[in-house]
Image (spheres, rainbow, N blue to C red):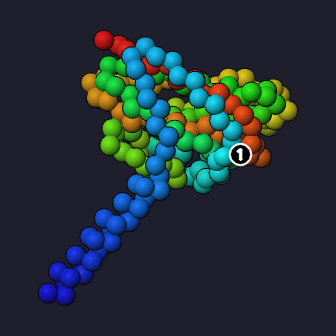
Amino acid sequence: MKNSILIFFILSTTIILNAQKSAKDNLPVIELESKSEILETGNLKDGSTIPLKWAESSQVACFPGTRFNEFQGNHILYRVQLPSYSQIKITVKPKDKKDRINVYALRLGVDNMDTPPNIFRAGSCEAAYPIYAGKPNYRKSNKAQSVELMSIRNPYSILIGVAGAVGVKEGEYELEIELLSKK
């Protein structure tokens, strides 16, 4: 009897915690139609920094720990539903070229509403940031960064992250999302 009560308590607590997490992690969802192009604007000052260990996990493989400095600023997250037989191109353009703003996108199961740092696996992840060898030059002007993802048979939930490099906690940007149907 005691074991049954304990199991019931654990399950009830888990359900309540998951419901609170879902409500808390409610992100802006961008609605797309076939062959559409959407432009969103934002400012990193509305985001926050997050731990990055999740990104280098082999089950996520978004960007290596040697490039964490490209994502140590504030993050803004968006969600897009990618229909089956489609391809999506996501581009972030800093309004001020001195702002080093990068982008990443995770392809998750259609019902997966997890967000970093609580991402433990992803179908795929793409990240775009300036490529360099050695020590980066953070004063060099930044240009638009783009990633692309596609689906074949199944639709997916795409989690988009717009992030500043180390020390970049504010900066305006445009987020361009282009959906291409493969049918």
Residue drawn at (66%, 46%) of the image: 46
56 vs 2: above or below: above
Farthest right residue?
A: 139
Q: Which residue is found at the position 33% from the left and 72% from the top?
A: 13
Q: In this view, does 68 lie to the left or right of 124?
A: right
Q: Is residue 131 left or right of residue 137?
A: left
The vertical placement of 7 against 14, above or below, is: below
- Residue denoted by label 1: 45
Q: Quadrant of residue 108?
A: top left
Q: Eyeballing the image, is 163 above or below 54?
A: above
Residue 109 place in picture, x, y as percent:
34, 39
Residue type at mark 1: give it.
Answer: Lys
Which corner quadrant holds the N terminus?
A: bottom left
Residue sticking out furthest to the left: 1
- The residue lying at 46 percent from left, 49 percent from top is 26
In the image, is 105 to the left or to the right of 74? left
Residue 31 in the image: x percent, y percent?
Answer: 43, 29
Crowd tier of the residue under label 1, counting other residues whose Cα lies within 10 Å: few below 14, some 14–19, many 20 or above: some
Taking 58 as reference, is 165 left or right?
right
User: Residue 173: x percent and y percent?
Assistant: 68, 31
Towards the viewer: 146 or 135: 146
